[in-house]
Image: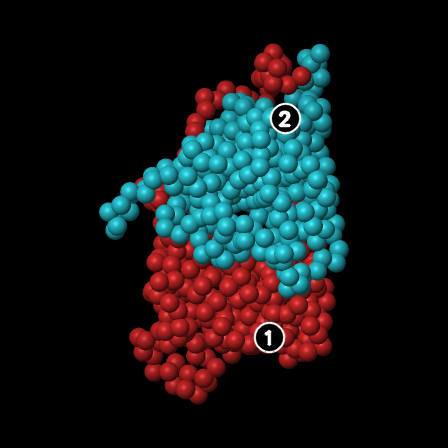
Amino acid sequence: MRPLKIIVLAKQVPDTRHVGPDAMKPDGTVNRGKLSTVFNPDDLHALELALNIKDRIPGTQVTILTMGPQKAADIIREGYYRGVDDGIMISDRRFGGADTLATSYTIVQAIKKIADYDLIVGGRQAIDGDTAQVGPQCADKLDIPQVTYVEEVLSIEEDRIVARRRLETGVETVSAPYPVLMTVHGSSPECRSRKAKKVMKYKYARTKTEMRKGDAILEALHIKRPHLVIPEWSVEDINADVTKIGLAGSPTKVKSVSSIVLTATESKVLTDSDNDIEGMIKELIKHHTIG
Amino acid sequence: MKSVFVYCEVENKIVAEISQELLSAGKRLAEKLGAPLEAMLFGKDLKGIESQISPYGVDKLFIADDDRLEPYRTLPHAALAHKILKQQDPQIVLFGATSVGRDLAPRLASKLNCGLTADTTILDIGDHFVKKEKKEYTDLLYAIRPAFGGSIMANIINWDMHPQMATVREGVMKKDVFDENYKTEVVSINANKILNNEDFVVEIIERHIEESDVNLKDAPIIVAGGYGVGSKENFDLLKNLANILGGEVGGSRAAVDAGFIDHNRQIGQTGTTVRPKLYIAAGISGAIQHTAGMQDASMIISINNDSEAPINSLADYVITGDLGVVIPKMIKYYKENAK
């Protein structure tokens, strides 16, 4: 079996699973500052899927690609700590405000710059939008097939890859030729943990922008160990058309947001006493709700 | 007026429930716009399938009938849909937020270079004033969806790159027959002329579709448990109550994540949306993720140790107490009082 070249698409997202009461501003908009950021959960599954292939086929090269503000360099470091070979950061203020169409255009420009790949994997969806769109949109723009909701890679052949997909009503096993893009379902194996040795090796990995404030010791280290410099691609680096990125390239716009308010119902408050419960059951039967 | 278009899913000659819901919702939008409703359907052995579609008031139906089009595969369906949408140039296109619709719609949105809103729960028509252009855009699709883990509802619009596309969650739109005898113009599409071998490079080797024995959507009574139920064994109590009342058992995401109940019984934003006659929530605190999927129940009973549980504000009856005590009593008094 020949080694594969794999690109992992990963995103740093606000942790919408733990939205506290202070995460919303009084006007109903999201207070992003109050949400911590995490490695998008499905993308961690995608990373595991890629690293698992690397375990199975020595020589496989895994590159992690992320797009976001400087803080998102954490994603690249987390990738290194778990065993990726390379990391690339797409970062430029002009990419901000992108919807899925503009995001997929941007990512595809970067993938075209990487040029050489057999397999692209990403999480099924990101918890900040739950759209599940960027994967299929990238596949379309690259004009390659997509296999969504992958749960397990069953076999890796010379010119095809076989995977099981998790559908809402069952499972489906498909075979696709390279190059192919897969989105990975949360029912696939959890990502391995960080390796202490890798953490030691890569904890000082930084982008140039992260280094801009100047740190003589880190700078000296980066000269000695160039693998610690995380490449950072701008609009020009990926040759992006500015009308297709960021807000300008995004057809969907948010017209308004409203916070969800539970409409209060006048409740009958009961205890667990026999009297209360028998009374309620009798009322429900009387009103033909039950019985 | 440009049309409203629906991508319909079909399997074994049966048009999917979600597609019937979409046709109903699409008709309501089309009526508001004074526009025709159009649909497309790709599968095999589709002779006479239009009888399942016409009653929803579909003016024009595009059918591609070919053995290779079922089960669904991305590339051939995307190529056919792209061709038809290019030619028909609709204003709005709707897909189910299903494993098919969520696979297909983004690929098409990329091809058509248009906007796509995912997991919409409310569809409407409205206007929007664009300050920068000093221009009022009328008759736009309002695609309204929960966002940020369900803490907000966002109204997503798209005024400049058409069509306006949306995937719509299952069970949210009301199914509504428009006219049993509606006349639909059927256009037969020759898939062979549009597709080539490249469209079939992904092969389906095996497929196991579980005939779901769970029908939460149509259950008149649902007994749902949350993390507060505490264990799989305690869920048996809920099952007993559901069985006796003639209902189904459901669970919150927390209960599913904890392994108390199967994921196909999950109620909420990432699960089934239900609107039963009676909803009994046991040990459910009432995260928005959950309440978004059940708040339209006609009557809600909340059983919780915590008298301050958020779900109590939705409930018609709030029982503060241990479900291990309350549920057996409910069963007992139901048996005693029901005829």
| Residue at the spot 55% in from the left edge and 70% down from the top edge | A7
Picture quarter containing residue B62? Answer: top right
Residue B188 appears in the figure: yes
Does residue A98 appear left or right of residue A139 in this picture?
left
Q: Position of residue A63 (x, y in %)?
A: 54, 73
Q: Which chain has been coloured red in this picture? A: A
Report how far apart the C-alphas of labels 2 and 1 lie in the structure. Answer: 52 Å
Quadrant where the N terminus of chain B is found in the figure: top left
Label 2 sits on residue: B221
Q: Which mark is residue B135?
A: none
Residue type of the residue flagged with mark 2? Ile
Q: Foreground: B7 or B272? A: B7
Left or right, B279 with reference to B337:
left
- State the residue in front, A28 or B272: B272
Residue A5 disc label: 1
Q: Nearer the viewer, residue B37 or A248?
A: B37
Circle 1 packing at 10 Å, graded few (<14), some (14-19), many (20+), is some
Query: Which colour scheme appears in the figure?
Result: by chain
Of all chains in the rendering, the one displayed in cyan is B
